[in-house]
Structure formats: structure tokens, C-alpha cells
Image (cartoon, helix red, strand yellow):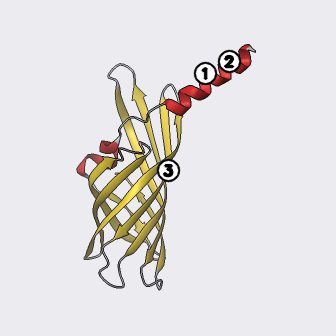
Amino acid sequence: MKKLLCLLILTANFAFAQMPNIANVWLNQSAPYIGTIGNDNEVIRLKVEISEQNKKNDQEYFVSGYSVVDNNTTKYEGKLTITKYKDGKKKGVVYGDYELAEENKGKHSGVFKGKFIYTFKWNKKTEKVENPYIEWIGNWKSYDGTLDFKTNLKNQ
């Protein structure tokens, strides 16, 4: 009986736990995420200019900004969705999905889709995050369906 009671209390805590607002994390201290796109590993930069937590679902964040490949700069809007969170005493890990739709400006615009991993260390003394590491792994597909490239971006 005690085990059942503990299980119910633990389940209730998870069900009603609120995700803290980490919208500033995605801004990456105003620096772009840098990585590669395509078979030739072209350099891509993805800048998040706006990041807001969804008021109806605290596991979602609305983001917008722009992507840059070669001299092609395209605005995008989309969302990040947290799917899993592991909290350790010294290290935390947040897993999720992203989908970012670029402004339709022809053949070289499309949709980024994939998964992200955000790892960080928690400093108890300063009560601040240290060594944040964010990686976005996925694909970019053009709107007309003729181009489909692997992408990998990281905070620098």
C-alpha cells in the first residue's frame, strides 16, 4: 500500500510539474549556431533572434530568425518541442524536436526538421548554468522537394 501511495504522489508531481522558461537558452547569447548542410558540408549559420515559451504548452518554444548558406540569407519561423528531460546533480540534458519553416523564396528555401540535444552543468554555488552545449541534428528539405540535405548545427 505504501508503494502505491508513493507511486501516486510521484506521478502527480511529474504530471503537474512546470517546465521552467528556458527561452533565453535558444538565443545562444546572440551568437549563431554554426554547422554543415549537404553532401559537400557547406557551412550554415542559423541565428535565433526571437524565442518565446508557448503559454499553453510550456514544453514548446516559438522561435524565429534567419539562416545563411553562402550568400543566401532566409528568414524562418518555427518551434522547438521538449520531449525528454534528464536532471542529474551536476549535469542536465534536454532532448527535443524542432521544425523551422523558411520564407518561400524559391528553390533554395525549405523546412528544417530534426532533433536537438541541450546539455549543461549546474553550478550549485552560483546557481547558474555552465558549459551549455546545444546540437541540432536533422534535415533540410526544399519546398519543391528537389533538394534534401542532412544538417548538423552546434552552438560555438
Tag 2: amino acid:
Leu
Q: CA distance from mark 3 to mark 2?
A: 31 Å
Say which of marks 3 and 2 sits in front: 2
Q: Secondary structure at mark 1?
A: helix
Using a 10 Å C-alpha cutoff, classify the residue at mark 1 as few (fewer than 14 neighbours), some (14 to 19) or many (20 or more): few
**In terms of sequence position, does the residue under pointer 3 or pointer 2 come before the other?**
2
Q: What residue would you read off at disc 1? A: 9
Q: What residue would you read off at disc 3? A: 96
On screen, residue 24 versus residue 13, left or right, reads left
Tag 1: amino acid:
Ile
Using a 10 Å C-alpha cutoff, classify the residue at mark 3 as few (fewer than 14 neighbours), some (14 to 19) or many (20 or more): some
Q: Could you tell me which quadrant the N terminus lies in?
A: top right
Instruction: Single out the residue that lies furthest toward the right.
Output: 1
Mark 3–mark 1 CB contact (< 8 Å):
no
On screen, residue 120 versus residue 12, left or right, reads left
Say which residue appears at 73% left-offset and 18% top-offset.
3
> Quadrant location of residue 64?
bottom left
Q: Secondary structure at mark 3?
A: strand
Say which of marks 3 and 1 sits in front: 1
94 over 145 or under it: above or below: above
Mark 2–mark 1 CB contact (< 8 Å):
yes
Q: What residue would you read off at disc 2? A: 5
> Quadrant location of residue 100?
bottom left
Residue 112 in the image: x percent, y percent?
43, 67
Tag 3: amino acid:
Gly
Q: Secondary structure at mark 2?
A: helix
Using a 10 Å C-alpha cutoff, classify the residue at mark 2 as few (fewer than 14 neighbours), some (14 to 19) or many (20 or more): few
91 over 1 or under it: above or below: below
On screen, residue 5 versus residue 152, left or right, reads right
Q: CA distance from mark 3 to mark 1?
A: 26 Å
Say which residue appears at 27% left-offset and 72% top-offset.
74
Say which residue appears at 39% left-offset and 45% top-offset.
56
